[in-house]
Amino acid sequence: MEYKLEKDKIVIIGKEDFNPEHILECGQVFSFFKNEKGNYVVLSTDKKAEILENETGFVIETETPEYFEDYFDLKTNYGEIKANLKTFDILKAPIEYGFGIRILKQNLFETLISFIVSANNNIKRIKLILNRIKEKFGKKMNGFFAFPTREELLKATEEDFATLGAGYRAKYLFAVLRQVDEQALLEWVDLPTKQLRAKLISLMGVGPKVADCVLLFGYGRQDVFPVDTWIEQMHDRFYTHEPNREKVREKLVSEFGELSGYAQQYLFFFMRAGL
């Protein structure tokens, strides 16, 4: 895929390896919406981008093109990744369906808080809770609220999080903010995946699935395979019934190796579409 960085935008040439609906609606991110023009608008930390489609591809309008070049993982060759994954019969149809998926490189702190909120929750409600948290504690930007920093969220009480709709997750959010900060999350970047996973699971509100999501969407680790209801259904359909999610995860990581994270996203998007 070809693209060009300009002063206030990124010009993407071609549509075979980039599709905003596929990227944003595949469960990996919650800070986005469609505006009155029907364009996707993405918010990350205190930054914003609007994606416009044209005949030859897409234009990402943003004041921070270098940030979103990394965020959308534009330097990675997804054509090659898809070619390698299509050697697995199980992935041929999912890749045809979700051809434009790219795994985002999201802010670590925002990813951790977002996926704690996501536990046993649906996407509509996750987005609602996170929007309330941003409006209550985040800095007001030009037309949107930034995702709050840890320092800003430390002002919140457990009752505040509950009032904003977090439910039982309120106590986890309150506790995890006192267990880890942005700097600690960054310092864990070079840890082996197994050790990093254990560090994440030691945090309040972070179980195996949330840890794997933070590893994949925050740390960019591709040797993980988050298992939720849709992946369980996929495993029942294409493999065998296995009620133990950890065994499902281990089997799928063993099969797909360093391509596990990519495989998970294509399969998740495909299954959730009811195909």
Image (spheres, rainbow, N blue to C red):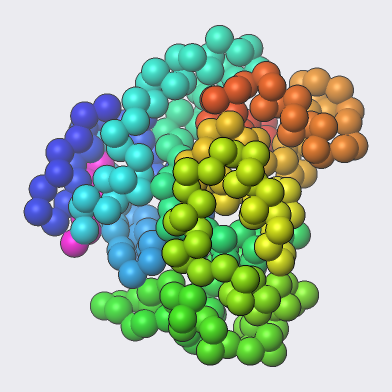
Residue 223 visible in the shown view: yes
The answer to which of 3 and 202 lies nearer the viewer is 202
Residue 48: x and y in percent read 30, 63
Q: Main secondary structure of the magenta part?
A: strand
Residue 139: x and y in percent read 36, 82
Which quadrant is home to the C terminus?
top right
Residue 110 visible in the shown view: no
Task: Name the side, left or right, on which 147 lies relative to 191.
Answer: left
- Identity of the residue drawn at 44% across and 75% down: 149
The answer to which of 201 and 114 lies nearer the viewer is 201
Residue 50: x and y in percent read 29, 57
Q: Is residue 59 magenta?
A: yes
Q: Is residue 261 magenta?
A: no
Above or below, comparing residue 163 to residue 28 in the picture: below
Above or below, comparing residue 255 to residue 5 in the picture: above
Above or below, comparing residue 67 to residue 142 in the picture: above
The answer to which of 50 and 163 lies nearer the viewer is 163
- Identity of the residue drawn at 74% across and 33% down: 249
Task: Name the side, left or right, on which 216 lies relative to 23.
Answer: right
The answer to which of 259 and 3 lies nearer the viewer is 259
- Identity of the residue drawn at 75% across and 30% down: 250
Which span is picked out in magenta?
58-63
Above or below, comparing residue 226 to residue 13 in the picture: below
